[in-house]
Image (cartoon, rainbow, N blue to C red):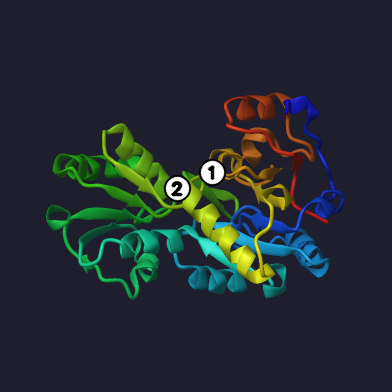
Amino acid sequence: MALQSVPYIAHFAELAPRYDVLLSDVWGVVHDGVIATPAACDALIRFRERGGTVILITNAPRPGEVVTKFTDKVGVPREAYDGIVSSGDVTRAVMALRPGKRVFHLGPERDLPIFEGLDVQFVTLQEADYVVCTGLRDDDNETAENYRDELAAMHDRGLVMLCGNPDLVVGRGDKLIHCAGAIADLYGTLGGEVIYAGKPHAPIYDQALALAAARRGGETSRARVLAIGDSVRTDLTGAARAGLDFLFVTAGIHAEELGTEDRPDPAALRRMLSAAEGMPIAIMRELAW
């Protein structure tokens, strides 16, 4: 589908009847890291009231139950979704296949719930069997470049990095902060091996679709599943690889690049999507019924 044929819509209601399941991104669609987006939450509630199933799918490097508590905190109503699958859940599944291994954790202490109940031993970088990266230790003030020397030491030891959040950046209120994906990508450029747990990679979509099937009592054709998100790199690419239609929300992490008007700048949008692996089925500024 060419960009000129992708419709820009104001109301999700015109798309909704085509789908039975939504896989919606969280940060940038239903909240901004500080407060819920009322219009998006309302749209998801209305979709569910009409018999649809909503699975929130997020690159947060924490278990789904921890993400649920955070969405409660910022005001996302439980009525807006049927379940949550996080990259933290996928990361835990990968670690569970490596019982008893020694782990070097690169990330903030708030991400430690990702390890709860798993057979892992925390050690120094020089003692580790592999690295789990969940983010920057101080994402308010650091970038991936602050970790270059540490990453070089990891590469010297030939350590595999398990990346618990493939996002490069995410919005926190009106500020963009760097995520684990930025560190993992830098490690890759240094020649390090990286396993990415979340979007745009297949395991998180497989897990989300399995949860949707459990909630609905059976599998849904992928032609009746719509992914929603604000990131070309993770959300659009992941949907394309999974064979899903995608609704692009432009008021998320790409808002500044695309302009702040009700409709994104066409030239900027064309540049952004030109290198994408797929095209959205429709474009909205923000999700709204």
Q: Residues within 10 Å of mark 1 (few under 14, many from 20)?
A: many
State left or right for residue 117 relative to residue 37: left
Q: Is residue 74 visible?
A: no
Regarding mark 2 in the picture, which secondary structure is present there? loop
Name which residue type carries label 2: Pro
Identity of the amino acid at label 1?
Answer: Thr
Give the residue pinned by disc 2: 166
Q: Is residue 189 above or below residue 50?
A: above
User: Alpha carbon of mark 1 to alpha carbon of mark 2: how far?
Assistant: 8 Å
Disc 1 and disc 2 in contact, CB within 8 angstroms: yes
Q: Is residue 151 visible from the viewing direction of this image?
A: yes
Q: Nearer the viewer, residue 121 or 31?
A: 121
Along the horizontal axis of the image, is 122 left or right of 220? left
193 left or right of 209 in image: left
Q: Quadrant of residue 41?
A: bottom right
Q: Which residue is mark 1?
A: 234
Residue 115, image quadrant:
bottom left
